[in-house]
Image (cartoon, rainbow, N blue to C red):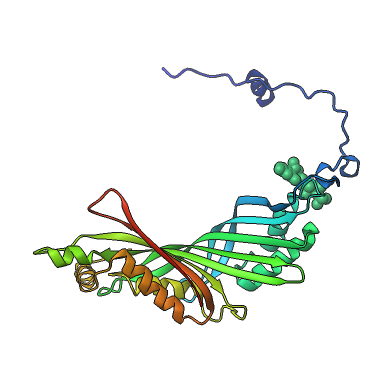
């Protein structure tokens, strides 16, 4: 038989679990009367390169040249600035205050132009000479099966970083990590049949040229650089005719991890809005428990 429970009022329940009455409160409750420790001015020995907040989850709106053309996604923000040796601390509340102003103003639309405005305003709000922001988010894009043309959603992990220094200006960079299929050329060469293949992850970090204004979607350009140089693309929905095509395409385009980083580098070299890049590939080897990795960096 079910036991009938007689619940005490909520306040009594809290007492039952250890809540106590508030003690005597003597410290000021008005903001103006409260000590402002973080604004203490004295020689605190060292300047700090970056102080602020990280791992701030916030909804953002992103635009894309691929479908869906606009999407709301959840980003993780890191926002910092320098402080000099004679400041005790930063004003932490001003970082999230600034973020919320952007959300309330029609949503935070994540363009590089908006991030330029954001970092400059953040530096001003913090009364500092500089501010930096890093925004990490999953970007979703439609992908069709090669034969059936059935659509599903893939995603890549994207990051945009912007820094502003008063009197100097802005720098911006971005990174994209996406999954691909790679088929081992050595395995294909030596085996009577088949070849082992694996899921590879390509990460591209790129520095934009000063005149880049997102007339071309950097996310799509980087995705293309990785996917069109892989053995095959990754698909969310595949019917048998699609699967046959993907399997044969991978066999026709074998790639070592070294081939991947060099071929992707060649595509990034051709993109005129990129002035420097790093390409990394990590293959989750299907015949080993370890991964195969390669990376290269280049400044044009
Ligand atoms: N500087 C600093 N603040 C911290 C840290 N950890 C938490 N905080 C909190 O940041 C909050 C204060 O933010 P501030 O922006 O300085 O608040 P405020 O001075 O009332 O705000 P303003 O009027 O904008 O100057 C407090 O709740 C602090 O406890 C830390 O490690 N350093």
Q: Which residue is drawn at 13% across and 64% down?
A: 190
Foreground residue, 45 or 213? Answer: 45
Q: Within the image, what quadrant is residue 97 found in?
A: bottom right
Q: Where is residue 76 in the image (x, y as percent from the top left)?
A: 57, 55
Q: In which quarter of the image is the N terminus?
A: top left
Q: Is residue 260 visible?
A: yes
Foreground residue, 56 or 44? Answer: 44
Q: Is residue 106 visible?
A: no
128 to the left or right of 257: right
Residue farthest along the left direction in this orientation: 192
204 to the left or right of 17: left
Residue 263 lies, with reference to residue 158, above or below; the image says: below
Foreground residue, 273 or 248? Answer: 273
Q: Position of residue 142 (x, y in %)?
A: 40, 70
Q: Where is residue 50 in the image (x, y as percent from the top left)?
A: 68, 54
203 to the left or right of 118: left
Q: Where is residue 298 in the image (x, y as percent from the top left)?
A: 48, 72
Residue 9 lies, with reference to residue 237, above or below; the image says: above
Q: Within the image, what quadrant is residue 248 found in?
A: bottom left
Residue farthest along the right direction in this orientation: 33
């Amino acid at each position: 038989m079910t036991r009938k429970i007689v619940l005490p009022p909520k306040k009594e329940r809290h007492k039952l679990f250890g809540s106590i009455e508030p003690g005597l409160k003597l410290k000021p409750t008005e903001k103006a009367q409260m000590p402002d420790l973080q604004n203490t001015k004295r020689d605190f020995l060292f300047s700090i390169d970056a102080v602020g907040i990280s791992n701030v989850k916030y909804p953002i709106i992103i635009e894309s040249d691929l479908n869906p053309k606009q999407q709301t996604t959840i980003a993780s923000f890191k926002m910092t600035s320098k402080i000099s040796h004679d400041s005790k601390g930063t004003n932490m509340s001003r970082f999230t205050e600034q973020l919320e102003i952007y959300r309330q103003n029609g949503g935070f639309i994540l363009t590089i132009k908006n991030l330029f405005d954001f970092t400059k305003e953040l530096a001003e709000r913090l009364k500092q000479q500089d501010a930096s922001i890093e925004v990490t988010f999953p970007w979703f894009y439609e992908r069709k099966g090669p034969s059936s043309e059935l659509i599903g959603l893939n995603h890549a992990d994207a990051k945009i970083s912007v820094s502003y220094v008063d009197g100097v200006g802005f720098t911006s960079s971005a990174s994209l990590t996406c999954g691909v299929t790679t088929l081992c050329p050595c395995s294909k060469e030596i085996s009577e049949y088949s070849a082992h293949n694996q899921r590879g992850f390509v990460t591209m970090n790129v520095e934009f040229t000063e005149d880049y204004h997102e007339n071309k979607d950097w996310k799509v350009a980087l995705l293309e650089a990785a996917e069109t140089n892989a053995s095959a693309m990754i698909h969310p929905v595949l019917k048998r005719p699609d699967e046959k095509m993907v399997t044969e395409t991978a066999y026709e385009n074998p790639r070592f991890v070294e081939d991947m980083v060099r071929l992707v580098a060649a595509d990034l070299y051709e993109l005129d809005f990129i002035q420097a890049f790093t390409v990394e590939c990590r293959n989750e080897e299907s015949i080993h428990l370890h991964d195969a990795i390669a990376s290269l960096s280049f400044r044009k």
